[in-house]
Image (spheres, rainbow, N blue to C red):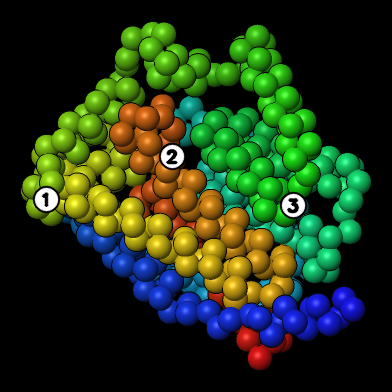
Amino acid sequence: MQQENRSLEKNNIQKVNYKGIIYLLSLIMVIGIVVLYSASYVIYYKYPEMDFDYYLIRQIVNIVVGLIFMFIIALIPFQKHIKLTPFYMVGLVFLLLAVFVFAPQGGSSRWIDFGVMNLQPSEFAKVFLVLFLASYFFKEDDTKHIGILEQLIIPLGWIMMITFLVAAEPDLSSSLIIFLIGLIVLYISGLRFSYFVLIAIMCIIGVVMLFQLNLLKPYQLGRIQEFLGITQKVAEEGQVDVSLQAISSGGFLGEGLGMGNYKFIIPVQFTDFIFAILGEELGFVGMAVFLFLYYFMCRNLIKAAIHGIYNMAAKVFVIGYAYLILLQVVINVGVVFGLLPPTGVTLPFVSYGGSSMMAFLGGFGFFLSALNDQSRNYT
């Protein structure tokens, strides 16, 4: 009977129009490159020894390296990725520990210096945790984890371990994203509601302990207090004010690409606050179109997973990956609009940064790998 049900599910699988998803991804990255150049060329006026296109060229290199990483992952069958997931996680933990060997940058130990580039393992942790949880629950396309130890404690233990390693760097924003996406994947995997109640209680106790034991770094506590209006605004909150002014000055249609002035004021205009530059130069229409591109891409990823992928581990991964993109977009845009405290979270496929670009394109590679497996096994 079970074999008959599986055969019926296979027959109901639809062909995925992955080209449309790739077109949306490509459009996001092309617009991102144009906006990044517009936001970054002003570095010449601060450092005349640097070229106008310094960050543009480096971002193109980041994209090329990310695409190579994506294609390598896509060429490996998804079932092999599932078998290799324990090794991926061991390697990830090693990289997260290795950051403490290198000299801190900006007061944080988040990067591994390879000379030609700095690698930020916390960016890869977001994607690989989703893959690990999907493979943990559905390694054999069957849910055999029915006890609290197998269904909650073990996967939650992995989530908490990765979260704590990233938080210790310290990188509070990435650790929160890792924790939240971990919970989202647990929900997608069918975790019992009673277990989520238990997790909620544990989270409340954890937050109380953070404040009572003074476990937060001073600048982290300051950001939260400033956001809640407990203390006066400082430089980082000032960035939010300037970003709101930039968006407001853009109006409905924007000032035009390259015509914005606030890029000269916002310190991180081509990384964390690049959406503010987009808002100033492309206006409300440009921001709306850009957000809809993200929405339709993630919506199509989820539809592809639900209707076009039979393997449950692959299905859960693709859905979790889509929600990871949406979560990071919401947080980045929320910071730019002053709805969330400054976090240092990048805008996926757009913000300057090699690790973020590689990690998210790597996630897309797993999606393509799942589709390749689908065509090999079920056509």
Point out the tag, 3 or 2, that comes first from the N-terminus. Answer: 3
Q: Is residue 165 above or below residue 133?
A: above
Q: Secondary structure at mark 3?
A: loop
Q: Quadrant of residue 63?
A: bottom left
**Which of pointers 3 and 2 indicates the residue nearer the eye?**
3
Q: Residue at x 88, y 48 (%)?
A: 150
- Please name the residue that numbered disc 3 is placed on: 190
Label 3 and label 2: CA atoms lie apart by 25 Å
Residue 191, given in percent of the width and then of the height, sits at 76, 47
Q: Which amino acid type corresponds to the residue marked 1 in the rendered image? A: Leu
Q: Secondary structure at mark 1?
A: loop
Q: Which amino acid type corresponds to the residue marked 3 in the rendered image? A: Gly
Residue 66, given in percent of the width and then of the height, sits at 46, 65
Q: Quadrant of residue 135?
A: bottom right
**Which of pointers 2 and 1 indicates the residue nearer the eye?**
1
Q: Which amino acid type corresponds to the residue marked 2 in the rendered image? A: Ile
Can residue 48 be seen in the rendering of this structure? Answer: no
- Please name the residue that numbered disc 2 is placed on: 331
